[in-house]
Amino acid sequence: MSHVAKSRGRGGFIAGFLFVPLALYLTFVIWPYVQTFGYSFTNWSGQSPTFDFVGLENYQALMEDEVFLSAIWHNLLLLVFVPVITILLALFFAFMVNAGGRGGAGGVQGVRGSGFYKIVYFFPQVLSLTILAVLFGAVYRSDEGGLLNGVLIKLGLVDPQKPIEWLNEPKFVLWCLLLVVVWHGVGFYLVLFSAAMQSVPKDIYEAALLDGAGRGQTFFKVTLPLLWDSVQTSAVYLGIVAMDMFVLVSTMTSGQFGGGPDHHSEVMATVLMRNFLYLGQSGYACAMGVVMLVLTMILSIITLRATRRDRIEY
Amino acid sequence: MGSTSAHGEHGTGDGVGRRDLIKRSAALGMIAVPTMSFLSACASGGGEDQPKATATAKADKNNPFGVAKGSKLDVVVFKGGYGDDYAKAWEAAFDKKWGTTSSHLATQEITAKLQPRFNGGNPPDVIDDSGAQQIKLDVLLKGGQLADLTPVLDAPSLDDPTKKVRDMLIPGTVEQGTLGGKFVAVQYVYTVWGLWYSGKLFKEKGWTEPKTWDDFLAVCAKAKAAGIGGLAHQGKYPYYINVAIMDLIAKKGGLEAMKAIDNLEPNAFEGNPVALEAVEAVYELVEKGLLMPGTNGLTHTDSQTRWNQYKAAFITCGSWLENEQLKQTPADFDMRFLPMPVLAGSKLPFEAIRAGAGEPFIVPEKAANKAGGMEFVRSMLSREWSTLFAQQANSLTIVKDGVDPNVKLRPGTKSAVDALKAAGDNTFNYRYPDWYSQMDLDIQDASNELMAKRIQPKEWIKRAQAAVNKATKDPNAKNNHRD
């Protein structure tokens, strides 16, 4: 048998097995999106197999839906603050844990007890978001039984007759949720950045040390540029988290699928779910899904473009 | 193909050996199977409407819907405060009588479990469509998914074959289950709404049951002076404080005021002095600091538990409260129901209460065993099954005198039953939460703002009216009307 036939047989074999995952991906990831796109032009109620084609009506309605527009605004706010705060904190802690220590002959090491800190920092990552929602629900509880209120009342900073209703305060609610996300995320990105830092050759740090660079200079001139790839990836991931937020908002805030008080913590996913499952406007909800997809893609591209740097090889 | 050799390299030039063939068909199968099931699960569009083979036998007087012996019955119930023991008992009784095989699913995730089945055209035969994740009835109706249950009402009663089923029910039941002009849901559990308090606390403090709103405020003020809250409500779910607001409107303005809201009249709230007075009355609690501190942000369980710990004098709720709080309530708490106290010059007396049937049982239009589903509903409306329910779920049903008098009731339920007796014909019930989901949510949002002191009563009225006006655009608005 010829060589050609042999390689063709193997090619078919490989193609067969590449084909399956691709097909699964198309079926379970791409096809639902395509379907969603189709439904977004209908008045499908979600509880019935019959519906009519309504053209762009859903998209027109979306443009005037104040609740959805405010939800987009909240997602954008989170999109700015979640990645920035999480990455900055994670970078700071990772640097302190890995290269922030001083003294010692080699010169490059973490602050004392860094092994312990790493475990402590990573701990929140182990908890699922649903557990976090319950946990922080108790922290933010609106009467004196809440952790925050309890402490503030003990300190005499809050009147026990008027405890702060954290998650029922339009001014606070979004920031309260932001804090939970950051608390949850910092540990994971700390470990990610730690790993990246440890792969930086020690001699680079030693050289910086010999040249008399301080902690700040070492960080900005050496560590950060070498970690840029990881930071970029983190920004995209955290951006996606900020665009979602469904679990926390829907369990912690008031309203059908959350979003309260009075839509002040509404995110796109909560408005979508309310319309999809509760109000019987699934076609409309699908239009929201399409908008979410488009926005998320645009933002990912922008993030990748904006953070593009020359890669440093070492 | 000339060769069927297992080895590709020995295959003929055109190349597809057996192993390749198997590989490829296996790969294709792996794709095809999930694709097909996914497609059919999500299927929407045409071609689904042709009638399926349904299980029916010949109908006669004893079998008015034609239940087929040996058929299958698919029952799905919401497993909430009433548990699902009652449903198991029912299914056993049904299978015994009709020789059917019942499948039983009890869940809290009604929407998640049933939405795909409704979309796929293979819904169960009977559903208790309740709980936080119920599929809204107005939505199901819009999709043509609900069977008309009028034939059940007109079928002979199991207790007395000379009477129709509809004659055995508490008045209002048919109205409660009618949507868009069709009787589609049996709201099976009879519930009353109002205020609740601890008989023990009141006795200790020497407080008496208030009958007017002023007396109510006075008790709340005494409670505050004694270092506990006046009124608690389940702030995270403003549904509950709406009980107080809406009851005050109905009692002060009479049934016309209530119907004006359900019928989406342009002056249901705005320009209606009764509505404003009711909202101002509730707002007085906020202004005078008579709410339990922090209650606006609490979940229903947190808030009710605080109340059970004597942190507030009153709480708003429906009569499922006692069952829901069984574990948290101290043994000597002596739970009591109180109709909403009245404003001066109210058209309805103090005894009038919001009462009505809840826990909707439905039969899907496309159920495979629709006859079985209808017969199941007819059986539910018999004294035998009603007593089974009362024993297993500790609650009353819409069947007239449907509970054996020997069933002993807990103090809260007993006081609710007494209040119901005192009310006589003076019961009322709003329909808009079933008819217009969005309007209900909008009014809840406004109430949440009111209780947090972020808006004033006049602004609440404006927002509530805006919600009403928005609801007039609902396609169901032309079908929903009450006289």
Image (cartoon, grey):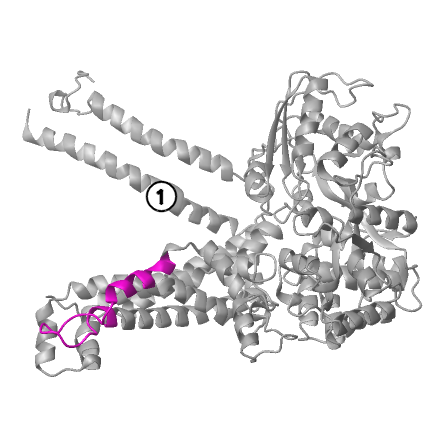
- Compare residues B149 and A203 and report the one nearer the observer: A203
In the figure, is residue B361 to the left or right of A28? right
Q: Is residue A50 magenta?
A: no
Q: Position of residue A269 (x, y in %)?
A: 50, 58
Image-quadrant location for residue A206: bottom left
Q: Residue at x 64, y 37 (%)?
A: B77
Q: Is residue A122 magenta?
A: yes
Whether residue B296 is situated above or below residue A282 in the rendered picture: below
What's the magenta region? A96-125
In the figure, is residue B253 to the left or right of B152? right
Q: Which residue is mark 1?
A: A26
Q: Residue at x 29, y 37 (%)?
A: A20
Whether residue B41 is situated above or below residue B238 in the rendered picture: above
Specify the farthest residue to the left.
Answer: A2
Image-quadrant location for residue A105: bottom left
Q: Position of residue B277 (x, y in %)?
A: 84, 71
Q: Residue at x 68, y 48 (%)?
A: B324
- Compare residues A313 and B414 and report the one nearer the observer: B414
Q: Residues within 10 Å of mark 1 (few under 14, many from 20)?
A: some
Q: Amino acid at mark 1?
A: Leu
- Compare residues B399 and B13 and report the one nearer the observer: B399
- Compare residues A122 and B282 and report the one nearer the observer: A122
Whether residue A175 is situated above or below residue B13 in the rendered picture: below
Image-quadrant location for residue B366: top right
Q: Secondary structure at mark 1?
A: helix
Q: Is residue B278 visible?
A: no
Chain at tag 1: A
